[in-house]
Image: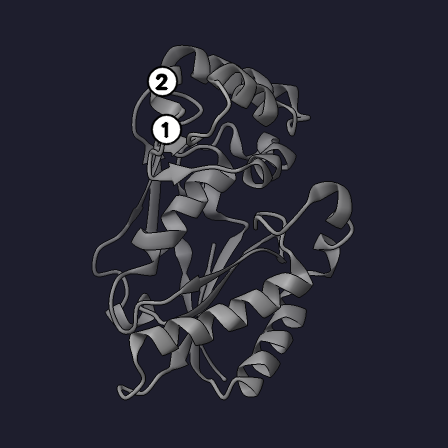
Amino acid sequence: MDIEEFDLKKIVSASIKDDGWPLNMEFKFIKNSVEQEAVQGAGIYLISFKNLIIYIGKFQPVNRNNIFNDRWLRHLETMTFRGYRVGFGRNSLNNDDRMGEFCGVIINPGLEFALCGRIYHDEPERFKDTGVVTSYNKLRFADQYWDGFVDLVDNSILTDFSFSLFKFDFSSEQSESIVKQKISNVEKTLLSEFKPVCNREYIHNKHYKLPKKNTRNAIIEKLINVCDDNQITILKEYLYKG
């Protein structure tokens, strides 16, 4: 399998947007920094941090769209808990109860202070679908590495992240529904085995020992085998390293 490698810091910019700390960073794709084919689907993607895979996802548009704008920038906002668009979504709980649930996954007192302070200032704007909605697992991840994220103001925040897009070969004769189903099957198989810490399939009190096993080599080996079983050809891996 061919691998094409890029410097993530030359493709994504990260900067302070406003004074709404800690949710005040903007992550942007740098236009014309890479060829379109390197950011288009369809395929499976992996996000790693400090050499362990923390997220497995699918990207289904065939030869269109931009995975940075559609997926990866949003993940960066939530995983670092620094993005200015981060919200907590809506559900049947009132905001106070919902806030209590999110605070329940936090250990770092610095993040708890930052979260409570930000919500105090702009609660109504955060408890809705902002387009970049966090989760308990992503907040728990940010909590674990908060001391490294909290004071960063530029693209040094990208240093320990890597993003991989495994682009699949789909003939023009295959319908979009078939393409989506095949990609979903691959993703489902990977998630059932590995359950990375930022995916919803990860349940902390059951799977806390799994992350150490989620190495790049282990997951890529499984990905290749699953693609072979489903008669899918991987054209290339596009690897973006921070």
Amino acid type at image mark 2? Pro
Q: Which one is in front, 111 or 204?
A: 204
Q: Is residue 41 at least partly visible in the picture?
A: yes
Residue ID at (36%, 67%)? 60
- Name, please, the residue furthest toward the front: 92
Q: Residues within 10 Å of mark 1 (few under 14, many from 20)?
A: some
Q: In the image, is residue 237 above or below residue 71?
A: below
Q: Which one is in front, 56 or 230?
A: 230
Q: Position of residue 235 (x, y in %)?
A: 41, 83
Residue 128 numbered mark, or none: 1
Q: In the image, is residue 122 above or below residue 162?
A: above
Residue underneath mark 2: 124
Q: CA distance from mark 1 to mark 2?
A: 7 Å
Q: With 56 as the anchor, is 166 left or right in this view?
A: left
Q: In the image, is residue 236 above or below residue 128?
A: below
Q: Residues within 10 Å of mark 2 (few under 14, many from 20)?
A: few
Q: Are marks 1 and 2 in contact (CB under 8 Å)?
A: yes
Q: Which one is in front, 42 or 174?
A: 174
Residue ID at (74%, 55%)? 210
Residue ID at (65%, 36%)? 144
Q: With 10 as the anchor, is 31 left or right in this view?
A: left
Q: Is residue 4 at least partly visible in the picture?
A: no
Q: Position of residue 24 (x, y in %)?
A: 37, 27
Amino acid type at image mark 1? Lys
Q: Which one is in front, 185 or 28?
A: 185
